[in-house]
Amino acid sequence: MKKLTRLLILFALPCLFSTARAQTATSTQLNTKQIMVVVTSGWDNLQGKLYAFSRVHHHWVLKFSNAVVVGKTGLAVGDGFVPLTIPGAPVKHEGDKKSPAGIFTIGTAFGYADKKDAAWIKNPYVRAFDTLICVDDMHSVNYNKLVAKDTAKADYNSFEYMHRKDNYYEWGLFINHNSTNTVPGDGSCIFMHIWENNHEGTVGCTAMTEHHILRVLHWINAKDNPLLVQLPRVEYRELRKVYGLPALVKF
């Protein structure tokens, strides 16, 4: 359990900026060399596209892109490391089947493989063993955390197994939504993982083909402080002006 607790610390990276400072931040101040941008056509759309950028000599360079799906009911403003208020936009809540929109740090990678077989991943990695669960019961002290079901305090009524009978979580990444100063009910257990297909949304995650999630995992590197920026395309264009984010040639 002590080892698992150390791993869980990686899921909740500290907030880097106050709200006031965030309004004038630039990509340099965000201190990242890798950004994944996910855009959709609108708040209610479930299909989108991911663009992966690396910062090279102070310029954003597109490394690859691919199709994704988000929540079945689209996107809603989530709790990222930069607080965002978007007038008229939905706000993320537990059970709304929406993926969080905003700017998020990336937590640990996970999968069904043993750690030695995932040594090529440059992020911290945890194996999704049979009793590893993510707690989505907002009344639990372990809300929005991965815990071992056979050792954690059983104060939860709702959770999901990380080792599923299908391959959805065979490879994935933990997205740090509502991870710092966790607010009960603001949403939990947000991942990047393998999809069912290109026209069925998730219950709140961002999903893609196995080939594409593996490409993300080969590319992403914790030492480069990677970020996920996830928004409808119109709102992304506005946010880009404030933070100096990468330009998207095509949607």
Image (spheres, rainbow, N blue to C red):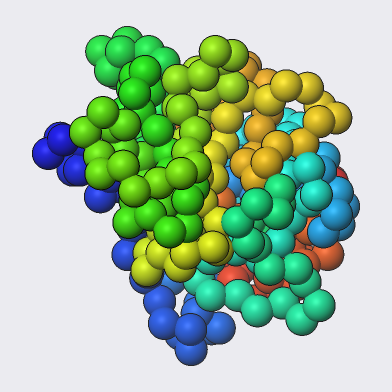
Place of residue 36 in the rendered image (x, y in percent of width and height, measured from the top left): 59, 46
Place of residue 77 in the rendered image (x, y in percent of width and height, measured from the top left): 66, 66
Q: Is 120 drawn above or below residue 125 in the view shown?
A: above
Place of residue 114 in the rendered image (x, y in percent of width and height, measured from the top left): 30, 13
**Residue 72, picture quadrant:** top right
Left of 183 or right of it: where is 35? Answer: right
Residue farthest toward the bottom in the current orientation of the protein: 20
Nearer-the-camera pick, 66 or 78 = 78
Nearer-the-camera pick, 235 or 196 = 196
Q: Residue at point 80% right, 49% down? A: 73
**Residue 167, picture quadrant:** top right
| Residue 210 visible in the displayed image | yes
Count of numbered labels shown in the rendering: 0
| Residue 215 visible in the displayed image | no
The N terminus lies in quadrant: top left
Q: Is 73 drawn above or below residue 112 in the view shown?
A: below
Residue farthest toward the left in the current orientation of the protein: 2
Left of 140 or right of it: where is 153? Answer: left
Left of 216 or right of it: where is 11? Answer: left
Q: Residue at point 52% right, 24% down? A: 169
Q: Residue at point 65% right, 79% down? A: 85
Q: Is 55 drawn above or below residue 76 in the view shown?
A: above
Place of residue 102 in the rendered image (x, y in percent of width and height, measured from the top left): 61, 62
Nearer-the-camera pick, 246 or 232 = 232
Q: Residue at point 83% right, 64% down? A: 234
